[in-house]
Image (cartoon, grey):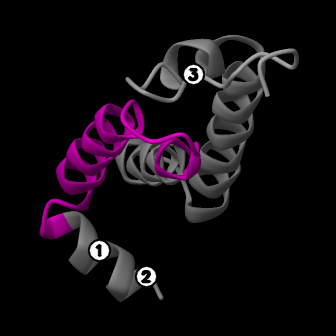
Amino acid sequence: MYEAIQWLSAHHAFEILLALGVVLLLVDYFFRTDVPAHFGYLCFAGALFFALPLTVTSSLIAGIGAFALLEILHRVCFSRFLTNAPGTERPAADEA
């Protein structure tokens, strides 16, 4: 397992996951669903796992904590900005 983590770290897993997370968050703006944003948060948590120079267990706990924090922030704040896709306005109850 340590060899796989070392190999991924040597092949720029941090940069790839960080770029993929940014792309997924930007793409999420154009969809009604928030699935790309949640995968983006998972990519950010994985990038944090590779960025921290801690033990595997500590990095894993930090990554899970970062993912949980991003999910909470999504529920509280980010969801109102990420669901503004053009043409996704729902009709009011009296118009339907």
| Residue 54 in the image: above or below residue 65 | below
Q: Quadrant of residue 34?
A: top right
Q: Name the secondary structure under disc 1.
A: helix
* Segment tinted magenta in the rendering: 10-38
Q: Which residue is mark 3?
A: 89
Q: Earlier in the sequence, mark 1 or mark 3?
A: 1
Percent of width and height locating residue 25: 38, 35
C-alpha gap between disc 2 and disc 1: 6 Å
Instruction: Name the side, left or right, on which 28 lies relative to 20.
Output: right
Give percent across and percent down for residue 33. Answer: 58, 45
**In screen coordinates, is 87 left or right of 58?**
left
Q: Residue at x 18, y 48 (%)?
A: 15
Element under label 3? loop
Label pair 2/1, CB-CB below 8 angstroms: yes
In the image, is residue 36 part of the stretch drawn in magenta?
yes
The residue under the point 57% across, 22% down is: 89
Residue identified by numbered label 2: 2
Image location (x, y in percent) of residue 63: 60, 47
Name the residue beneath numbered marker 1. 6
Q: Residue at 60% across / 17% down in the picture?
A: 78
